[in-house]
Image (cartoon, rainbow, N blue to C red):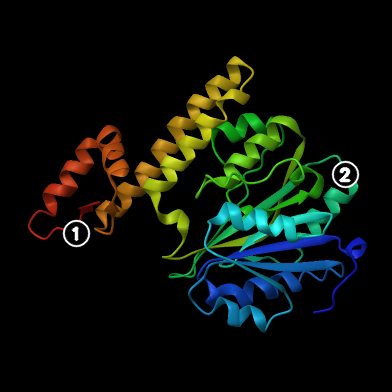
C-alpha cells in the first residue's frame, strides 16, 4: 500500500480483529469504498488464532499484531499507530455503509470544535438476513441521555477528532462496554453531534462478544458506577438511576429470551440477576428443563 506522509493523512480507520478473519476482507473493502484519498487503514490483530494474519497480508492495510490483551488495548494500539486527523474504529465483523465515513468527516471539518460525530446504523442479522435501522437521534444533553443508556449502539458509527483521543484513551480494565465508558467521559466535557444518516452496519451473529448478556450487564453497570462522579445535577442523578434500571431490564430480558429458547449458559452473576429481576420466569424455565436440562450455571 502507498505510504502517505504524515501530514497527508486525513482519516485513520482502526479495524480491530480477534478471530474474525473470515469477515476482515469485507470490513476493509467497505472502508476503501468510502472513496477517501487521504486514508489509512490499520488492522490490529489482538492475538488471533485463525487466519487473520494471512487475510490482512493480502489487503492494502497496515497490519499490527499484539498478544491478546482485549478490545480496549487493541483500540489504544490503533490510536498510537495512527496518524489521521480523524479516527474511526471498525470491528472486523462489521462494515461501513457507502459514504458513511465521508458524511461524518464533512461534519467534523465544518465544526472542528466537536469531539466526535455519530450517525445512525443498521443491524444485519446474519442468520436470517433481516435488517433493522437504528436511527433514534439525540439532539442535545448528550451526557444526560448517555447516562440513561448507550444510544449510539455501534462504535463504527462514530468519527472522533484526534485531539479528543489525545486526552482520552480506552480503559484497558474493561473487556466490554469500553465505548460506553469513553462516551460518558467525552460527553461530560465536550460537544458532540448525532445525525440520522446511516453510516455503518452491525452484523449480528453467534460469535458477537455482545451476545454474552450476563457479562455485558455487569460491564454496563460497572461503567455507570465508575462515572457516577461526573454527575453534577439532580436531573443527572435521576438519569443515572434510570440507566441502572434500563440495563438490568434490557439484559435480563435478553437472558430470558435465550432461556425460553433453551440456549443460555448462565454464569453466577446472570443467575442471581435473573433471580432478582425475574424469579418466576427463571424458576419455570429450570423446572421445565429438569428432565432434559440445557441450563448450566458456571
Quadrant assignment for the N terminus? bottom right
Is disc 2 surrounded by few (<14), some (14 to 19) or many (20+) residues within 10 Å?
few
**What residue does disc 1 label?**
294
Estimate the spatial distance between the alpha carbons at disc 1 and disc 2, rounded to whole Å: 53 Å
Residue at 59% from the left image edge and 78% from the top image edge? 53
**What residue does disc 2 label?**
112
Left or right, residue 178 beside residue 291: right
Q: Earlier in the sequence, mark 1 or mark 2?
A: 2
Quick check: can you spot residue 100? Answer: no
Residue at 89% from the left image edge and 63% from the top image edge? 6
Secondary structure of the residue carrying tag 1 is loop
Q: Does residue 116 sit above or below 206 in this rendering?
A: above
Please provide percent x and percent y for residue 288: 13, 52
Left or right, residue 212 beside residue 104: left
Secondary structure of the residue carrying tag 2 is loop
Quick check: can you spot residue 282? Answer: yes
Considering every residue shown, the one lying at the far top of the view is 234
Residue at 13% from the left image edge and 55% from the top image edge? 289
Considering every residue shown, the one lying at the far front of the view is 67
Looking at the picture, tell me which residue is in the foreground, 37 or 17. 17
Amino acid at each position: 500500500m502507498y505510504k502517505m506522509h504524515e501530514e497527508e493523512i486525513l482519516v485513520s480507520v482502526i479495524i480491530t480483529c480477534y478471530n474474525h478473519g473470515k469477515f476482515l476482507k469485507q470490513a476493509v473493502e467497505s472502508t476503501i469504498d468510502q472513496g477517501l484519498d487521504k486514508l489509512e487503514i490499520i488492522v490490529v490483530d489482538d492475538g488471533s488464532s485463525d487466519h487473520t494474519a494471512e487475510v490482512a497480508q493480502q489487503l492494502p492495510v497496515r497490519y499490527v499484531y499484539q498478544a491478546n490483551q482485549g478490545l480496549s488495548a487493541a483500540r489504544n494500539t490503533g490510536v498510537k499507530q495512527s496518524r489521521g486527523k480523524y479516527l474511526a474504529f471498525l470491528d472486523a465483523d462489521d462494515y461501513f455503509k457507502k459514504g458513511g465515513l465521508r458524511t461524518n468527516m464533512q461534519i467534523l471539518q465544518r465544526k472542528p470544535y466537536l469531539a466526535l460525530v455519530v450517525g445512525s446504523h443498521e443491524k444485519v442479522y446474519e442468520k436470517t438476513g433481516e435488517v433493522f435501522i437504528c436511527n433514534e437521534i439525540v439532539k442535545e444533553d448528550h451526557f444526560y441521555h448517555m447516562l440513561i443508556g448507550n444510544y449510539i449502539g455501534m462504535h463504527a458509527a462514530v468519527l472522533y477528532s484526534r485531539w479528543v483521543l489525545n486526552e482520552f484513551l480506552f480503559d484497558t480494565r474493561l473487556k466490554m462496554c469500553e465505548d460506553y465508558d469513553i462516551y460518558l467521559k467525552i460527553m461530560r466535557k465536550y460537544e458532540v453531534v448525532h445525525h440520522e444518516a446511516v453510516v455503518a452496519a452491525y452484523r449480528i451473529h453467534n460469535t458477537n462478544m455482545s451476545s454474552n448478556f450476563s457479562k455485558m450487564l455487569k460491564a454496563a453497570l460497572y461503567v455507570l458506577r465508575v462515572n457516577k462522579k461526573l454527575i453534577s445535577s439532580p436531573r443527572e442523578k435521576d438519569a443515572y438511576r434510570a440507566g441502572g434500571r434500563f440495563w438490568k431490564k434490557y439484559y435480563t430480558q435478553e437472558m430470558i429470551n435465550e432461556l425460553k429458547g433453551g440456549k443460555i449458559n448462565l454464569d453466577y452473576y446472570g443467575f442471581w440477576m435473573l433471580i432478582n429481576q425475574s424469579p418466576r420466569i427463571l424458576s419455570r424455565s429450570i423446572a421445565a428443563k429438569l428432565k432434559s436440562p440445557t441450563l448450566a450455571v458456571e
